[in-house]
Image (cartoon, rainbow, N blue to C red):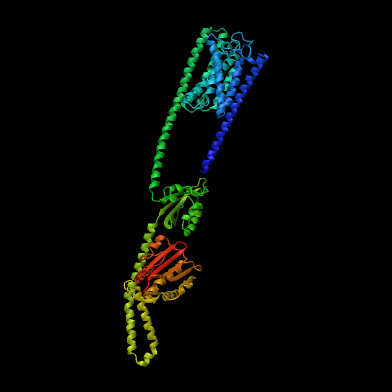
């Protein structure tokens, strides 16, 4: 976007420069015409004939001609600016030029004289038609006046007429100038064929050029400078049309003047030579243009084939990019933004392709899990120093929707290094691996559970017999030993008995999933059970640096299995201590009596859980920890339900988790 703005600015500057240059040229040419016209008007006023014809025996510029040149130049200056008022004045000036020029021409056709020839000043220098401009001059003013009127017209027919009128004026003026050039290289009287003054021809040519610059795209100059075949043909024929009559005319005048041949024969030879040379030149130009046109068509065909191949290649790549399951990012280091994304990340508006493209890199950080941002920064640094062939991989979590993190694999590679040194762009291939991660985690849990079950079965089968043998041997020893000897080893026998009991309990606990005993409910004090659970968790809480805040007093009677409920509460307390930051954790324990329930609330200020985790919190074998079997909170729920109670959980990420257990009050 920045590059486009710079290019637009440069194009605007170039275009503005061209407009200023053309306007300067228009003013310069119009100014020359005004100066010439003013000089001739002055010469008429002071009766100074030298400025009227410039060459001896040449036609003079009439007073009306100089006056119309003055009006025409002013008209150009009025229409050069796109201003409605000035353009209207220019049109009025054009109509004035047309009326005077047309009236002067009509005077040669019908036997009637308009009072315009000597209206401003008497012409004492001309014997025929004193004060009247020549026919060609009148026609040129009529054509130029009409071109002035149609200068700002948007109608295609008027634009076409405007171009032809200016071309007519330019052609007549060039022919008149050629006549003067021809007169300069021969002694033969040539100017008898020309009725236009030399400076009149020059002024007409300057006016046509100035007007063509007012509308550069709608004039004969644009036609001659165009790239189309017609313009090329016109450019090639123009030198012949202009120079060949001059060369042949000089030759004819020289031959006729030397009395080598008769005038009639000379004119015939002139015509034949012009026709033959024109035929040869035209044939040569035609063959040249045909060859160029053939080369152009071959090139166009080659370009068409290349374009088709390119389009097929583009379509193939577009289809490939659109069907790939991976998200393709192109990162621009020049703009520090995402330059390209092949598809929407998520249907949500903020995750759509159009929204993400152009997004600054710093704006992407909130969508990356805080623990993965450093990994992404490290990848960025490695890519800057990476070779073009190196591939880098990592896994990170992205938040595509509110409070839901999903796992993605990222493969990165250098994409653009224009100068071979500085990295400009790199590409990221990103794939959603959340389902794969879940499957891996479930397989890991299944493996852990399988291992634990195998250990439990192994202990059950391998330890029970030795433990039983030890117990029986201990009993036998107690019976067979005489009393004095028995007294000596009694302490050791008790140690064996306690150790044997401990081992039996260990085996029973390992097989707890297959041996279940229903809860035996009796009236208990909930505050006492909570205190006992806190006492058992004291070491764990102390080591975690957690502060416990209690809010309860008195007795809170419920029906409970004291040992099982202690296990449930202990599980919640241990989870709370593990979820908090060491040294900053706070666990709050509240108990309150309500109308029909006793409510126990245990909350922490730990890392919290996402809604999806909360929904699965009590599922068997579900855990958000990197290790563990995920059976603790499932057991909590089972114990709570055995007490005819219900448990609720509220949790917010980075704010903490709150457990509420609602016990029915004894009737």
Q: Could you tell me residue 486's position as x and y percent?
A: 37, 90
In this view, the residue farthest toward the bottom is 484
| Left or right, residue 372 beside residue 640 | right
Q: Could you tell me residue 81's position as x and y percent?
A: 57, 29
Number of numbered discs visible in the structure rendering: 0
The answer to whether one can see residue 175 in this image is: no
Q: Is residue 278 above or below residue 558?
A: above
In this view, the residue farthest toward the front is 595
Q: Is residue 79 above or below residue 192?
A: below
Q: Could you tell me residue 460's position as x and y percent?
A: 32, 75
Name the residue at 33% across, 82% down. Answer: 471
In which quadrant is the C terminus drawn? Answer: bottom left
Name the residue at 52% across, 42% down. Answer: 3
In this view, the residue farthest toward the right is 46
Quarter of the figure with residue 252: top right
Name the residue at 41% across, 39% down. Answer: 310
Q: Could you tell me residue 171's position as x and y percent?
A: 53, 19
The answer to whether one can see residue 18 in this image is: yes
Towards the viewer: 473 or 215: 215
Towards the viewer: 472 or 505: 505
Name the residue at 59% across, 16% down. Answer: 181
| Left or right, residue 336 beside residue 198 | left
Towards the viewer: 259 or 167: 167
Quarter of the figure with residue 189: top right
Q: Is residue 574 above or below residue 189?
A: below
């Amino acid at each position: 976007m920045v590059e486009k703005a710079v290019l637009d600015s440069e194009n605007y500057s170039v275009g503005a420069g061209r407009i200023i240059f053309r306007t300067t040229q228009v003013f310069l040419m119009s100014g020359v015409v005004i100066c010439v016209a003013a000089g001739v008007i002055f010469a008429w006023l002071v009766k100074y004939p030298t400025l009227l014809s410039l060459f001896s025996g040449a036609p003079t510029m009439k007073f009306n001609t100089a006056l119309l040149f003055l009006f025409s130049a002013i008209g150009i200056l009025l229409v050069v600016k796109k201003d409605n008022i000035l353009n209207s004045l220019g049109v009025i000036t054009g109509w004035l030029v047309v009326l005077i020029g047309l009236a002067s021409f009509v005077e040669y056709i019908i036997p009637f004289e308009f009072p315009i020839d000597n209206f401003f000043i008497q012409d004492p220098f001309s014997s025929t038609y004193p004060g009247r401009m020549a026919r060609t001059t009148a026609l040129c003013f009529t054509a130029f006046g009409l071109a002035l009127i149609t200068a700002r017209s948007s109608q295609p027919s008027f634009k076409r007429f405007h171009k032809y009128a200016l071309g007519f004026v330019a052609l007549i003026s060039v022919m008149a100038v050629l006549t003067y050039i021809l007169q300069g290289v021969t002694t033969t009287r040539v100017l008898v064929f020309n009725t236009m003054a030399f400076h009149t021809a020059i002024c007409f040519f300057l006016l046509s050029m100035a007007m063509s610059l007012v509308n550069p795209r709608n004039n004969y100059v644009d036609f001659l400078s165009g790239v189309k075949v017609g313009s090329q043909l016109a450019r090639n024929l123009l030198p012949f049309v202009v120079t060949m009559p001059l060369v042949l005319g000089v030759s004819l005048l020289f031959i006729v003047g030397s009395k080598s041949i008769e005038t009639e024969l000379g004119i015939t030879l002139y015509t034949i030579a012009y026709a033959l040379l024109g035929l040869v030149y035209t044939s040569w130009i035609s063959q040249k243009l045909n060859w160029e046109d053939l080369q152009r068509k071959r090139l166009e065909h080659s370009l068409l084939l290349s374009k088709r191949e390119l389009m097929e290649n583009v379509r193939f790549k577009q289809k490939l990019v659109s069907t790939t399951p991976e998200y393709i990012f192109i990162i621009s280091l020049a703009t520090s933004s995402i330059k390209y994304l092949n598809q929407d990340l998520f249907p949500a508006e903020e995750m759509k392709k159009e929204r993400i493209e152009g997004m600054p890199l710093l704006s992407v950080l909130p969508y990356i899990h805080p623990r993965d941002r450093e990994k992404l920064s490290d990848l960025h640094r490695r890519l800057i120093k990476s070779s073009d062939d190196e591939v880098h991989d990592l896994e990170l979590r992205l938040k595509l929707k509110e409070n839901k993190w999903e796992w993605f694999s990222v493969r990165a590679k250098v994409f653009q290094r224009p100068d071979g040194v500085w990295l400009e762009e790199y590409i990221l291939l990103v794939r959603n691996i959340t389902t794969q991660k879940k499957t891996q985690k479930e397989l890991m849990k299944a493996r852990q559970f399988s291992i634990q079950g195998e250990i439990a079965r192994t202990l059950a089968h391998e330890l029970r017999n030795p433990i039983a043998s030890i117990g029986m041997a201990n009993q036998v020893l107690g019976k067979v030993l005489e009393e004095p000897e028995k007294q000596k080893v009694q302490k050791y026998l008790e140690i064996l008995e306690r150790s044997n009991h401990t081992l039996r309990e260990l085996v029973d606990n390992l097989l707890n999933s297959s041996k279940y005993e229903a809860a035996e409910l009796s009236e208990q004090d909930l505050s006492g059970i909570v205190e006992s659970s806190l006492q058992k968790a004291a070491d764990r809480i102390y080591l975690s640096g957690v502060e416990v805040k209690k809010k309860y007093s008195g007795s809170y009677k419920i029906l409970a299995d004291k040992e099982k409920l202690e296990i449930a509460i202990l599980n919640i307390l241990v989870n709370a201590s593990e979820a908090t930051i060491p040294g900053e954790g706070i666990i709050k324990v509240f108990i309150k009596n309500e109308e029909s329930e006793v409510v126990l609330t245990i909350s922490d200020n730990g890392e919290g859980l996402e809604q999806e985790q909360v929904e699965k919190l009590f599922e068997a074998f579900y855990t958000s920890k990197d290790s563990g079997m995920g059976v603790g909170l499932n057991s909590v729920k089972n114990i709570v339900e055995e007490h005819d109670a219900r448990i609720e959980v509220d949790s917010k990420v980075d704010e903490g988790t709150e457990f509420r257990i609602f016990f029915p009050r004894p009737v």
